[in-house]
Structure formats: structure tokens, C-alpha cells
Image: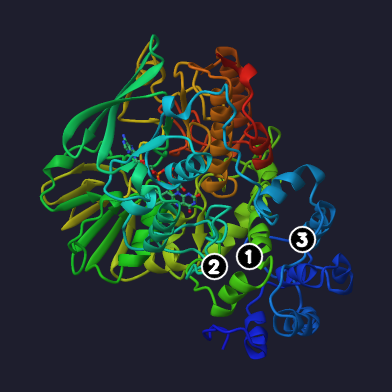
Amino acid sequence: MHNQKIVEINKNNISLAIKSASFPVLAATLVHVVGDIKILDDLPKPKMAMLGEIQGYFTEQEKQLIESIALPLLDKYFLDTGLKDFYIPSDDEMHKIMNYIVGAEVSEDYVPMMLDELNLRPSKRIKNIVAPNKREMKDFSALIIGAGMSGILMGIKLAEKGIPFKIYEKNSSVGGTWAENTYPGCRVDIANHFYSYSFEENHQWSQYFSQQPELKQYFQTCFDKYDLAGMTQFNTEVSAMTFDDSSNLWSIKSINNGSEDSEEFNLVISCVGQLNQPKIPEINGLESFGGNIFHSARWPQDDQITGKKVAVIGSGASAFQIVPSIADQCDELTVFQRSAPWMFPNPDYHREVEDGKKWLLENLPGYSRWYRFLLFWPGSDQLLDSLFIDPEWQGGETSINETNDQMRQIFTDAMLGQLQDKSLIPKVIPNYPPFGKRMLQDNGAWLQSLQKDNVRIFTDEIQELTHGGILSNNQLHEFDTIILATGFKAQEFFTPICINGGDQFFHDQYGDSPQSYLGIAFDTLPNFFSTYGPGTNLAHAGSIIFNSECQVKYICSAIDYILENNIKHLKVKKDVVASYQEKLEARLNQMVWQHSSVSSWYQNSKGKVVTTSPWRLIEYWKWTKKFEASDYEL
Ligand SMILES: Cc1cc2nc3c(=O)[nH]c(=O)nc-3n(C[C@H](O)[C@H](O)[C@H](O)COP(=O)(O)OP(=O)(O)OC[C@H]3O[C@@H](n4cnc5c(N)ncnc54)[C@H](O)[C@@H]3O)c2cc1C
């Protein structure tokens, strides 16, 4: 009934759609419809906002009451008066709506960030740089490397400003992560109504956590809408870049459709991501395996799974999605696991979005924005406090403080409740604190598949690969196909591009211990910025898109400054980087990702976390709001 297709706006459809509503959000939208914040006083109050709980813990009676008040108001809005502009509350009223939705006081300092995210005001005019004594646009050119989520975003924002740029993309299409990871089951694990650009909504996500083809299509649609094709060179891989101090230009070497090419740019923005270069594990005999072997991000077009004996090496985020998706197809499926993943109970993980919900997102004023806010708030900084290690904690190596220990218990109970095969307990219950590595979404699919008759999980170390299979615990297991779900070279930033900012090669200088300011600027790389750089991965909150939007805003503000002041050369100051790094490392040292019992892709070869951000989103948002010229040598 709730999933009935709704197209037209009529009385029947409005009442049908409301059944799919998030009621705290529905209540908030009534303010837009009636133009009076006081309407909230007459409605039941949500108890609180929690990840995965979109109904504010309303009882059925409370929902019915809201429905009975909302229906006549919506009928009137849509049918009697016809569609018209809806009421935009004042900032103070918006704050009250925020408090109402989350059932708590949203502290003052979050309000500007949330208003920005809500983006409910008519869009502000884009600032074009046109004043007379400014640098002529034709003398300026920027290169964006990569056309994934971040590169497209950067392109959109530069295009809006009228700044000349090119995008070099090594692949033949856009999407980055969402173009390359075509393995079965690949999907987001951050809800899609939040994992999307703040300024480009998609009301038609088919699932709450949509799959790779739909994500790829979303980014393609954005790329097309903003007309970026004319600026983009596909099949063009940057191999080396060198900064020339006398001309203040970057010389970019690339492989363009198989041939070497070179071009100069004033400014380079890396949008190559952290998770783009597959990591092939160093296992003895890897080359000698005689069957099919491939990395999860290089999934073959032909079927190498059906009816085969398949091994999956790894049990991180990709394996977690692959295993349930292929288990029934394989003759035998064996998972080789180094450490078990923690999972967060989430019954919506594979759920379809109801048509009524899509209708509300599309038609009801403010609904999509407040729904995004409801996802954003509990998924932003609410968790961070619980991720600090309590130095006095006596609870052992599997938790870091009291709250973390309570969560460990909840997650453990949720897993135990799914295990009929008790022999799996020591293998699947992690032996490190929850949130120490990327949390995965538990709708039962992972443990259900591990308990299938044709599926096994081994936790002994792999000794070597042989022509026929995998040797582990001195036993040879034969396979037709081996899937390397072994992640990415996340700590080797910008690899394999050979970057020389004038003094030294970046990788020689830093190896896998990069030093940066905000993960955006580097004191050895002039006229260079990065998105999704060191220390900007998000493990406690939110979607990477939020951080990329912060970075792109900062970079645009820097470009404004460069052009307005005719700056030829800028490089972040060494002491600015040093003090930022000191703060960053001090904070990271207190956090769960750096705990002695955790080893993960967040860490470099020395065990130091280099990929992931310990900052509150509000902190990072404030620091990246505006470029400060005084932080730079000009
Ligand atoms: C399987 C998987 C699932 C994920 N799920 C989530 C999730 O649920 N939520 C979340 O927030 N994040 C998730 N992530 C992280 C994800 O990478 C980011 O959300 C986001 O897609 C990063 O976008 P990006 O543009 O910065 O990098 P990418 O998407 O990696 O794009 C980089 C682009 O740069 C190009 N490129 C690289 N090197 C060169 C070169 N030398 N020359 C030219 N072009 C180059 C690449 O071809 C690619 O197109 C996931 C990652 C993976 C791998």
C-alpha cells in the first residue's frame, strides 16, 4: 500500500504519501506551509534523533495526531490555493525547527553550518571576478586531476565562477569510486539522502543506501547538468608534475590515450581521492596462482563466480558487501579474514525507498532539506565524544571508555542474536574497540551468509598462494577464483604521480607520513591544493561529500584571493603546517583509531593514523570557511 506509485497531486495521493513520512520532518514542513512557527506548539514533540531512527520515537497515536493536523493543511496548500511560494522562516525560527526535529537543543554554534547545509534560502548570487585591476582570466588556468565526486564538485564551482580550468581523468568516464567499484553489492553505507551534494538533491534514490550504478549515474547527471564535458580530457592520466619557480607554473606530464603529453597550469587541484589505487597484498606466490585472481575494484566483465570455488581475501567494507551478494552463486565460498568487522544494526541497509517518500521529497516544501538535516544531525558530531580514549579506563583492550563499552555490548548482542552456529563466535566478534575501524552496516546479511552451508571463514594467516590455491595453517585449499578485497593504498597520497614542488619529490620527502594544512595545502607544493587529502577521511560521522564541499569552498576562496590580488605564487607557511600537524596528531593520539589494539587502513606503515579526521565537522567547517592569506607565503 505504501509503495503504490504516486504521480499526480490529489487528495488521495497526499494522504497516501503521508503514510511514508518521517513525522518529525512532516511536522517541520507544516511551518513552511502555514507560515507560522507556532504550529509546532500544537504538535507532539519528537523524543530524540538517533542514527537510523527517523520517527523521533513517536508513538502511533502521536503520528496519527500529526497526520490528522497535517492532512487538511496540505490539502489546502496543494489543492485550494494552488502551488505557491512557501514560507521561509527566519534564522531564529529555523533554529527552533532544528530543536524540534532532533528533540534537543542544537547549540548556537552549529546553526550557521546547518543553515548552510539546509540551503533553504533562494540561492545567493555567484561572485564573479570582474573588477578592472584583477588578473585577466585568460592568463590563468587551473588543472583538476580526477573526475570523481570531488573533481566534479570542484569543476562545478570553478565553472560557476567563470574560472578557466581543465579536468584530466585517467578513466573513460566520471564517477571515480563509483565507476571503478562494480563488484556485486557495491553501495554506500552512508544514507543517500545525505551522501549527495548539498546543492544537488536526488529525490528518486531507489534505496536508502543505493547501489553503485545509481551512484555513478548521479555523478554523471551532475557532470552533464553543469556542462563539464567540454573541460574534461578522459583517458588522460597525470604521471608527473613539476613546479617551476621562475615561471610559477606547474608542468604536467600525462599519458593521454596512450601517448605522452605535457601542459602548463598556474594552479593544480588534486581530486584523486584516497581510495583509488588498489592495494595488492604482499603474499608469497601471488603470481603463481593458476586460476582467476582480481582486486575487488577491478571486477571482471565475464562471470568468474558462478559454480566456482571462490576465495575472498579480506573482510573489510568491500568483502562485507561482496560475500552476501555472491554466496548463493558460488559452489564454495571461503573468506580469509585478518580481523572481524564491527557492525552497526541497520535494518534499512538494503531497503527500497517507498514511492510515498519520493513524492514527499519531490513535492512537499522543505521536506527533502529537513529530512537531510535529520540524517545529518545524529550522523555528524554526536558520536565523537565517545571516541576519545579514557586514560583511566580499566575495561580491557576491547573498549576505550564506558560509552564505547556499552556500544560494544549492544553490537555484540546484536551479532550473537544472529548466530545459530556458535562455533563462529570467536571468529566474528571483533577483539578491538567498536569504531576502531570503519563501522559496517548490519542488516543481517553478513552473518547469514557466513552461516550458509557452502560458506566458510578462516582466520589463520595465509602462508602462500600456490598454482592451485591458498596455503593456510599448512593446508592447501583449492580455488578457481581469488578475490582480493584488500583495500587501497590510502596512505600513499597522490600515488603514483611523481610530484616535485621545486625542492624535492613529495613521496621521497614524506613517504606515507604526509604533512599538510587542513589536508588541503602543503608547504612544499606551491600553487597546489588537494581535496580528500591527509587527515580528511571521515570515520566518526557524515559523508565524505561534506568534507569535500568544505575543501572546495576553501579552495575557491583562495582562488578569489589569487585573482583579486594578482598572486603568482603562494605556498602555505611551514609554521602553519607544523602547528596544524601538532594539533592533529595530539588529537588523533587520543582517539579510538590510534588505540593499541587497532590496526587499519587509517594508519601508515608506522602505525600512525594519517588518513582520517579527528575533528568535529563544525571545527573543520569553520576552519575551511575562508582562505586566510596570512597563512601563506605570497
Ligand atoms: C567501495 C567504496 C565504498 C565507499 N562508500 C562510501 C560511503 O558510503 N560514504 C562515504 O562518504 N564514502 C565512501 N567511500 C569513499 C569514496 O571514495 C568517497 O566518498 C568519494 O567517492 C571520493 O571521491 P573523490 O572524487 O575524492 O575520489 P575518487 O572517487 O577516488 O575519484 C578520484 C578520481 O581521480 C582519478 N585519478 C586518480 N589518479 C589520477 C591521475 N593520476 N590522473 C588522472 N586521473 C586520476 C580517478 O580515476 C578517479 O576518477 C567509499 C569508497 C569505496 C572504495
The span from disc 2 to disc 1 (Cα, nearest Å) is 8 Å
Q: Which residue is mark 1?
A: 368
The residue at the point 43 percent across, 42 percent down is 151
Q: How is the image coloured?
A: rainbow
Where on the image, by quarter, is ligand 1?
top left
Identify the disc placed on residue 203: 2
What element does badge 1 sit on?
helix
Q: Is residue 151 left or right of residue 571?
A: left
Q: Do the CB atoms of the residues marked 3 and 1 lie less than 8 Å apart?
A: no
Q: Position of residue 187 (x, y in %)?
A: 42, 60
- Asked whether the residues under the numbered discs 2 and 1 touch, taking CB atoms below 8 Å apart as contact, a structural biologist would say yes
The C terminus lies in quadrant: top right
Mark 1 vs ligand 1: CB under 8 Å? Answer: no
Q: Report how far apart the C-alphas of labels 3 and 1 lie in the structure.
A: 14 Å
Residue 340 picture location, percent across and down: 44, 51
Q: Quadrant of the N terminus?
A: bottom right
**Residue 182: where, in percent of width, then height?**
31, 57
Query: Which residue matches tag 3?
Result: 88
